[in-house]
Image: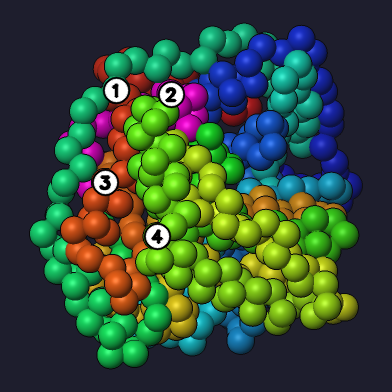
Amino acid sequence: MTTLSDRFDYRAGAVAALGDPLAVAASLAKGATAPYVLFERGGQWSFGSGAAYELLLHPDRIEVRSGSGTTVTPTGPDPLQQVAELLAECPLPGWRAYGWAGFELSYLLHGLPGLIGSEPLLHLIVPEREVRCREGEAALRAVDPGDLPALEALVAEGPAPAPGRPLELDESESGEQYRKAVAAAVDDIRAQRLQKVILSRIVPVPQDIDLAATYLLGRRGNDPARSFMLDLGVHRAAGFSPETVVEVDPDGWVSTQPLAGTRALSGDADADRGRHEELLGDPKEIFEHAISVKAACEELYTMCERDSVVVNEFMTVRERGSVQHLASRAGGQLAPGRNAWHALAGLFPAVTASGLPKAAACTTIHQYENSPRGLYSGAVLTVDADGSLDAALVLRTVFQRDGRTWLRAGAGIVEHSTPEREFEETCEKLRSTSRFLVPSTPSDTGRPAGPRRPA
């Protein structure tokens, strides 16, 4: 970690005539060592590595690490406002923080402390080095100006990791157990214990995966709302997020994008068109979607000026990799005294990844799923010093931890759900990622990190 002096700043550089920014981003990630985060939004790939300033939210404490040492603050009743205040103390002008929020953060936010566990709930870094690249150019900055020449060389050098040949994966793992959980959840809904719940299942990947090559191949085969790749020391992941949990711009406009209601995309134009029309006319899917949009609006009312809340897109169809979804967008203007972290607290977890009411849905998820979710259905996010925040829902993702690799997918359960159809839906979603898993080779150790290697 860089030692922070009383006066320090980023030093900037640039590379023009850049090649494919996706390939450049994948190449940076291929050679990186933890901690790093790659995040794509709107045609720009942002890559941050190293930690000039680091924040971890635990169930009972918040740790901040910097060159001046580590400080520990007890977690209070409004933990995300504590995060906001501590992050604002980062002395780097114009900082951008990168990181993740795990699904179990929802237990802290919704008054379910007995379900939380001991794992960190949120992890952010303000990087020592950063690249932001789009078609034709890349902007670079580093706390240590000596890192810039090496960073410029890495951006210019290429090539991207060779995608290789993807492996074949059986997506039917744990199918019988999942069908039983769906049937039990339907009984809970009919007993009016809740309206909707998203239940998920894990599919283990039986061999090591080249994460960067998988990200490159998968991004070329998907059209996500956001994409990302990260390694913050424990969790490693690469994903193609179909929707955002929350977006907040510097002027305080909040937007959220619920997707609920799913049909497969096969590549056969006539068959896909038929499923498109079926999706728009299916009462179960329409109900599932409509109650999600209503819930999103109700959450926006808690943080926004009431008259500003609008639904500016309703029940269109968005294509996301191997599936198509009913999609809407709702937004509003933050009320005085509210900030982006109020917005994240109010909208997290995404209603399309938890259910309704959220506290009851989270309790049901904990009851019927056999392992913590961690990153799955949490968020990968960027937060800027200007008050903006962008949080992508962690779905369609390959996960790695402790020598294991796995996929995870879920489906929205309502009263008219059937176990077989919900299982089929999870298979359809898994194919957005499972088709692109590139096995590691003996040489897949990343480029060696020299003493001044910046990424």
Q: Nearer the viewer, mark 2 or mark 4?
A: 4
Q: Nearer the viewer, mark 2 or mark 3?
A: 3
Q: For this rendering, which residue is in front, 393 or 140?
A: 393
Q: Badges 4 and 1: C-beta atoms under 8 Å apart?
A: no
Q: Amino acid at mark 1?
A: Pro
| Among numbered discs 1 and 2, the one appearing first in the sequence | 1
| Among numbered discs 4 and 1, the one appearing first in the sequence | 1
Q: Nearer the viewer, mark 4 or mark 1?
A: 4
Q: Position of residue 401 (x, y in %)?
A: 33, 47
Q: Name the residue located 74 percent from the left edge and 48 percent from the top edge.
A: 96
Q: From the viewer's perspective, tell me whether residue 294 is left or right of residue 444.
A: right
Q: Position of residue 42 (x, y in %)?
A: 69, 37
Disc 3 designates what residue? 427
Q: In the figure, residue 27 lies in which quadrant? A: top right
Q: Name the residue located 54 percent from the left edge and 79 percent from the top edge.
A: 109
Asked if residue 135 lies in the magenta stretch, the reply is: no
Secondary element at image label 4: loop
| Among numbered discs 2 and 3, the one appearing first in the sequence | 2
Disc 4 designates what residue? 282
Can you say whether 196 is above or below 230 in the image?
A: below
Can you say whether 234 is above or below 435 in the image?
A: below
Q: Amino acid at mark 4?
A: Asp
Q: Which mark is residue 166?
A: 1
Secondary element at image label 2: helix
Q: From the viewer's perspective, tell me whether residue 239 is left or right of residue 202.
A: right
Identify the magenta region: 202-222
How far apart are the alpha carbons under marks 1 and 3? Answer: 17 Å
Q: In the figure, residue 163 lies in which quadrant? A: top left
How far apart are the alpha carbons under marks 1 and 2? Answer: 9 Å
